[in-house]
Image (tube, grey):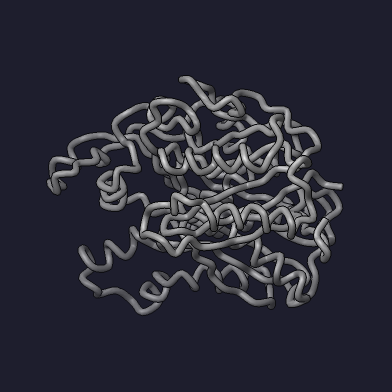
């Protein structure tokens, strides 16, 4: 344990490409079938011909329509509030008793992209003032605070694909500093417009023209990159949990300060991040049973995480990534992957994607018995955002 002690995950909520609600996520993972589906308008043209791209289908793990219209006009706010509400209800069922100061953290990179697109291109800026306010990322936070009568601090966190880990570490800082009694943390990314996906294809990291398990093969030969996904994932974090899912022992973040998209090939800052995460958690590397990797299936991320796993951890430390199943959910990526680990501790195993090619010897696939060893959750955000969080089964 760290000097100040860990924080417990005592409630979880999720909206993903598998559907609305935590059972949909777990059932989808257990099926070992990707959440992505062939979807019209995601042809991934790199020529700039948007009309040509719109005529073709591509693989994306998009959140299906749903949610409560009372929660907002857009899919983003509806998913954010639905995930948070499910996490709060889940925590209450498991015996959580909220304190006087409940804070709210929201991890987000791109907000109401669908509504902003309509604001400029369809409505030409002519909307009601209250509908304009709904475009702001602070609005669904304010309405959630009002719904529950929370009076702690509320703010957004943004660190690209590492935003989920950044939010968990910020929540721990709030609790360690005594600013709050509990934290509701939500990570939301519902940004898969065809235009956004197309630019990731142009960057050479996203694949839309092949089955997800074939295209995205983290730590396996022939991987071409990732299939994009959407998600809103929420946790209730507290030191007063009765039946927690898992404990966040500690973690760390660093920045490469190297390139807009590439990882520093020296790995010096990623290496420091992992070392400091273990130190903050008060954990030896030999206590880590699994690296729940960022694992997007890109060449540089595979090389980085493979090297660090071999450098830091013992030969029996396993490596896995669920991105082939849930997709790369951008701002919500680390959060949905932490949720998988937390549910794994609660249920005794993690459903990891099947192996389809020659793989790293430490790669775990299928039903992974998670046991009682620690999990290091790494997340490498585009632009040099390095993060690592150390998770443990509940005491």
- Residue at 37% of width from left, 39% of height from top? 60
Whether residue 77 can be seen here: no
- Residue at 26% of width from left, 52% of height from top? 195
> In which quadrant will I find the N terminus?
bottom right
Viewer-side residue, 28 vs 349: 349
Relative to 63, is 346 on the left or the right? right
Q: Taking 144 as reference, is 64 above or below it?
A: above
- Residue at 82% of width from left, 46% of height from top? 394
- Tally of numbered discs: 0
The image shows residue 297 at horizontal and vertical percentages of: 44, 37
The image shows residue 250 at horizontal and vertical percentages of: 72, 58
Viewer-side residue, 96 vs 222: 222
Residue projecting furthest to the front: 266
- Residue at 39% of width from left, 62% of height from top? 112
Location of residue 114 by image quarter: bottom left
Whether residue 281 can be seen here: yes
Relative to 267, is 152 on the left or the right? right
The image shows residue 252 at horizontal and vertical percentages of: 64, 60
The image shows residue 80 at horizontal and vertical percentages of: 53, 58
């Amino acid at each position: 344990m760290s000097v100040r002690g860990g924080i417990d995950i005592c409630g979880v909520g999720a909206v993903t490409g598998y559907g609305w609600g935590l059972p949909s996520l777990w059932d989808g993972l257990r099926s070992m079938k990707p959440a992505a589906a062939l979807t019209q308008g995601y042809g991934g043209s790199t020529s700039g011909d948007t009309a040509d791209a719109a005529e073709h289908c591509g693989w994306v793990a998009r959140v299906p329509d749903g949610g409560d219209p009372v929660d907002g006009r857009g899919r983003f706010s509806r998913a954010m509030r639905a995930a948070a509400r499910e996490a709060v209800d889940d925590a209450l069922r498991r015996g959580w008793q909220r304190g006087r100061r409940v804070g709210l953290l929201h991890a987000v990179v791109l907000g109401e992209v669908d509504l902003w697109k309509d604001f400029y291109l369809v409505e030409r800026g002519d909307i009601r003032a209250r509908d304009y306010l709904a475009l702001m990322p602070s609005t669904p936070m304010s309405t959630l605070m009002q719904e529950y009568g929370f009076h702690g601090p509320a703010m957004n966190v943004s660190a690209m694909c590492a935003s989920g880990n950044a939010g968990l570490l910020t929540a721990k800082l709030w609790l360690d500093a005594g600013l709050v009694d509990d934290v509701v943390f939500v990570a939301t990314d519902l940004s898969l417009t065809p235009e956004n996906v197309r630019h990731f294809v142009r960057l050479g990291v996203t694949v839309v023209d092949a089955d997800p398990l074939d295209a995205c093969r983290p730590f396996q030969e022939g991987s071409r990159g990732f299939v994009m996904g959407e998600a809103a994932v929420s946790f209730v974090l507290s030191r007063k949990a009765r039946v927690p899912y898992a404990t966040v022992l500690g973690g760390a973040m660093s920045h490469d300060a190297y390139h807009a998209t590439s990882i520093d090939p020296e790995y010096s800052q990623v290496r420091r991040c992992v070392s400091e995460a273990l130190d903050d958690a008060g954990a030896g590397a030999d206590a880590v049973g699994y690296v729940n990797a960022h694992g997007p299936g890109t060449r540089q991320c595979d090389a980085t995480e493979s090297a660090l796993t071999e450098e830091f951890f013992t030969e029996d430390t396993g490596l896995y990534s669920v991105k082939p199943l849930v997709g790369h959910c951008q701002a919500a990526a680390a959060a949905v992957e932490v949720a998988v680990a937390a549910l794994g501790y609660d249920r005794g195993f993690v459903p990891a994607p099947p192996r389809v090619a020659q793989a790293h010897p430490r790669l775990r696939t299928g039903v992974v018995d998670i046991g009682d060893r620690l999990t290091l959750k790494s997340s490498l955000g585009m632009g040099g955002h390095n993060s690592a969080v150390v998770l443990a089964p509940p005491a």
